[in-house]
Image: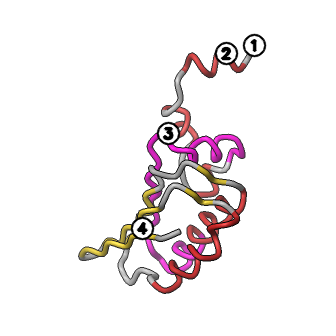
Amino acid sequence: MDIRVDEQADLTVWTLEPSLTIYDVQDLHEQALASLPETGQLVINGESVEDIDSAGLQWLLAIHRWARDQGIDFLLELGDSSVTQLLDLFHAHGLLGLPAILIAANTDPREASNADR
């Protein structure tokens, strides 16, 4: 798995590939360590992620904590990705500084009403 890094002025964007699982996280983490941002804002674009498991979620949480400890603003771009579904499943949006209402706004209300049946 590769991480695409784009740096501009005070912004670093990491674009993730479709898989963020236990099989990918070690390589991804090594690449991330080699390209840690020296900017004031880190954006992780996870819109293309199709496969994610708890190891991928742990990696996102670790990067979020690192960014917070370094005083770097952290933003996670999700769209309607698998990451959004996993965050919702584990109620983990708050751990990444994301309001639950933003995650819920990305779901189809018909799916929510069918889930209650």
Q: In front here: 17 or 111? A: 17
Check disc 1: other Cα within 10 Å, few if <14, some if 14-19, many if 20+: few
Q: Are marks 1 and 2 in contact (CB under 8 Å)?
A: yes
Check disc 3: other Cα within 10 Å, few if <14, some if 14-19, many if 20+: few
Residue 27 x/y as whole percent: 59, 76
Q: Which residue is mark 3?
A: 102
Cα gap from disc 2 to disc 3, whole angstroms: 20 Å
Q: Is residue 75 above or below residue 117?
A: below
Q: Which residue is mark 4?
A: 14
Q: Residue most toward the left? A: 9
Cα gap from disc 1 to disc 2, whole angstroms: 5 Å
Q: Which residue is mark 1?
A: 117
Residue found 55% across the figure and 48% down from its top: 50
Q: Are marks 2 and 3 in contact (CB under 8 Å)?
A: no
Q: In front here: 77 or 96? A: 77
Amino acid type for the residue under numbered disc 2: Asn
Residue 70 x/y as whole percent: 51, 80
